[in-house]
Amino acid sequence: MRELTVDLGERSYPIYIGEGLLEEASVYFAKHGISKKSPLMIITDEQVAGRHLAALEKSLKDGGFSVVSEVVEAGESSKSLAMLGMLVGKALEAGLDRNSAIVALGGGVVGDLAGFVAASYMRGVKFVQVPTTILAHDSSVGGKVAVNHPLAKNIIGAFHQPELVLYDLRTLQTLPPREVSAGLSEVVKHGLIWDADFVDWCETNAEKLLALDPDSIGHALYKGSSVKAAVVSQDERENDLRAILNLGHTIGHALEAVAGYGELLHGEAISIGMIGSAKLGLRYGAPEDVYTTTKRVLSACGLPVRLPEHYDVDSIMDAMMHDKKFKEGTMVFVVPTAIGKVDIVKDVPVAWVREIVEQLKQEAELQ
Ligand SMILES: NC(=O)c1ccc[n+]([C@@H]2O[C@H](COP(=O)([O-])OP(=O)(O)OC[C@H]3O[C@@H](n4cnc5c(N)ncnc54)[C@H](O)[C@@H]3O)[C@@H](O)[C@H]2O)c1
Ligand SMILES: O=C(O)C(=O)C[C@@H](O)[C@H](O)[C@H](O)COP(=O)(O)O
Ligand SMILES: [Zn+2]
């Protein structure tokens, strides 16, 4: 078992990464102050429920917790205000009180949604993250919780940190291959912003990662979570450093919004976005390998590195103007300066961004 800490003073919390942790959940919940006197609500999705909900419910009920579970539709469309309202209704009906906890069992969609329920129900109750996707090594850490608006991704949300993150690696064995690749996108991102050796390791071990080799996946998630925990511990509310976690997201979020959420998975959109950021890096004078290495490692992980032909450049540019990174009339981009290093550039010329989005699309047309 591996353990990390997100260091936020009195609100610090642990990330437990290991095999078979669902079966021991009640021990960890009790250790971290989750009440047995008030009901807790597990929020999960229909894909995860059939595979992993029973194990979590059994452990908690056997350990004396009072548990209700709510199952939402799988996929990005569940990150909506309508779903938030529905879940608040269910929490009230089930008698959740201010000492209750909300538990997210699933990937980033469930984590972001359940976290926002926890942040807003009765102005905030305790929250536990039980991630079940590779991507969720990112989403379960750091307390960004949100739902989407048709015009912009994650635009209605809060910062609400969990009490603990309980990451049972066995749950990952049931992931479909496309979700494995999508999750590796954020793993690679953590290397690209922080640790060149880890990027190299990801490329060398890509096949093992895609095959869900337990040791390789355990190492990758530990390294990725360590970067995330280190960044969040230094800048919880994204006043400066934390913005580096947004590498690839300026373009990526726009692609997700334009596609109506769901056509491209988050990790896939971010992969294309990171290629765009690498191209931007070249414009700012980064060495050529920033682009070639980024493209090689993402391709090795089975991720898209071009923009599908049917995407409309004007719509993507419009969507970028609604992003949280569009501030005071300028575009903010995380720009690589070397592999493992990035800068935050606050006034990127819109014309450059447009040219890069056009190039990403032309490359697909030339395929
Ligand atoms: N809050 C953050 O810091 C943060 C960070 C990164 C991403 N995100 C958000 O996370 C979301 C993407 O997360 P995701 O990629 O985990 O998506 P997801 O939650 O939609 O999960 C992906 C798919 O895999 C299924 N699934 C989940 N676990 C499974 C398992 N163990 N076995 C079989 N199927 C399983 C789900 O039902 C879903 O269909 C996006 O909304 C993104 O914006 C948030
Ligand atoms: O935790 C962060 O900070 C991140 O930027 C992580 C991202 O991978 C994640 O997609 C996050 O939800 C994006 O946040 P947003 O503030 O740009 O919506
Ligand atoms: Zn992301």
Image: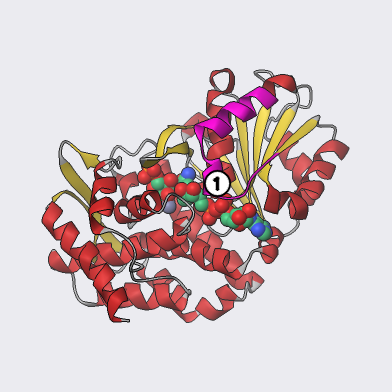
Residue drawn at (76%, 25%), measured in percent from left and top?
39
Which residue is located at x 72 percent, y 41 percent? 28
- Count residues near mark 1 (Cα–Cα under 10 Å), then give few for <14, some for 14-19, many for 20+: many
Which residue sits at x=73%, y=49%? 49
Quadrant of the rendered structure where residue 279 is? bottom left
Colouring used for the render: secondary structure
- Residue 148 in percent (x, y) is at 44, 39
Q: Which residues are magenta?
A: 71-90
CB at disc 1 and ligand 1 closer than 8 Å: yes
Query: Which of these two is toward me, 101 or 14?
Result: 101
Residue 177 colored in magenta in the image? no
Q: Is residue 190 above or below residue 361?
A: above
In the image, 252: left or right of 318?
Answer: right
Residue 1 appears in the rendering: no
Q: Position of residue 247 (x, y in %)?
A: 33, 56
Q: Is residue 114 left or right of residue 252?
A: right
Count of marks overlaid on the render: 1
The answer to which image quadrant residue 306 occupies is: bottom left
Left or right, 327 with respect to 110, comes to left
Relative image position of residue 244 (x, y in whole percent): 32, 51
Above/below status of 26 relative to 195 = above
The C terminus, quarter of image: bottom left
Q: Please name the residue that numbered disc 1 is placed on.
A: 109
Q: Secondary structure at mark 1?
A: helix
Q: Is residue 41 above or below residue 48?
A: above
List x then y, in percent, for residue 91: 68, 25
Q: Is residue 72 magenta?
A: yes
The dominant secondary structure in magenta is helix
Residue 254 in view (yes/no)? yes
Nearest to the observer: residue 209 or residue 327: 327
Q: Nearer the viewer, residue 124 or 34?
A: 124
